[in-house]
Image (cartoon, rainbow, N blue to C red):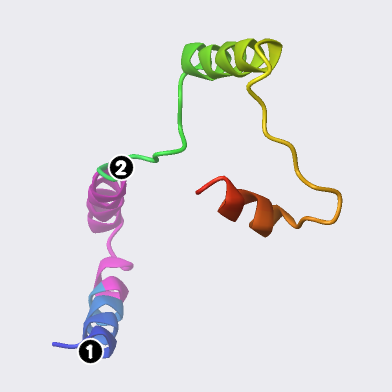
C-alpha cells in the first residue's frame, strides 16, 4: 500500500470514527501517545539551559570566542566553525 492509498484509507476510517464520540476519544488518546513517543531534541530543563549559559559566559571570560568577519554571512561563519 503506497502513501496515497494509506492516506485515503485513513480518511475513510476517520469518517466512520468521527460519528462516534467514544471512538473519537479513544483515537485521540492513542494519537497523543503515538506522537509523544518522539522526544523533542530541542527541549531542555531550566537547569540545563542555565548551565549552558554559564558555560558560554565562562568561555567568553577565558577568551574562547569565535567572531564573524564583517562581510561574512551566517552560513559561511557556521561552515567555518565546522557545524
In the picture, residue 17 is in which quadrant?
bottom left
Find disc 1 in the rendering and name its residue.
Answer: 5
- 26 or 41, which lies in front? 41
Badge 1 marks a residue whose secondary structure is helix
Q: Which residue is mark 2?
A: 36
Q: Secondary structure at mark 2?
A: helix
Task: From the top left corner, tell me how far across and down residue 70 is, in percent.
Answer: 86, 49
Give the main secondary structure, helix, strand or loop, of the magenta stretch.
helix
30 shown above or below 40:
below
Residue drawn at (75%, 57%) of the image? 73
Number of labels in the image equals 2
Q: Residues within 10 Å of mark 1 (few under 14, many from 20)?
A: few
Taking the magenta stretch, the answer to whether it contains residue 20 is yes
Front residue of 30/45: it is 45
Instruction: Judge from the rendering whether residue 49 lies leftward or rightward of residue 13; answer left or right.
Output: right
Could you say which disc has been placed on residue 24 in the image? none
Determine the image quadrant of residue 1: bottom left
* Residue placed furthest toward the right: 70
Q: Nearer the viewer, residue 75 or 16?
A: 75
Within 10 Å of the Cα at label 2, are there few (<14), some (14-19), or many (20+) other Cα atoms?
few
Give coordinates of residue 56: x percent, y percent: 61, 19
Magenta segment = 14-36
The CA distance from mark 1 to mark 2 is 25 Å
User: Where 19 falls versus 66 (above or below)?
Assistant: below
Residue at 22% across, 82% down: 6
Residue drawn where x is 22% and y is 89% of the image = 5
Tell me, yes or no, whether the highlighted magenta stretch contains residue 10: no
Name the residue nearer the viewer: 27 or 71: 71
Are the residues tagged 1 and 2 within 8 Å (C-beta)?
no
Amino acid at each position: 500500500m503506497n502513501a496515497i492509498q494509506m492516506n485515503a484509507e485513513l480518511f475513510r476510517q476517520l469518517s466512520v470514527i468521527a460519528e462516534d464520540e467514544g471512538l473519537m476519544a479513544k483515537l485521540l488518546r492513542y494519537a497523543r501517545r503515538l506522537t509523544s513517543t518522539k522526544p523533542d531534541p530541542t527541549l531542555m530543563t531550566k537547569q540545563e539551559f542555565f548551565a549552558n549559559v554559564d558555560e558560554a559566559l565562562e568561555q567568553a571570560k577565558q577568551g574562547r570566542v569565535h567572531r564573524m568577519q564583517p562581510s561574512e554571512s551566517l552560513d559561511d561563519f557556521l561552515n567555518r566553525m565546522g557545524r
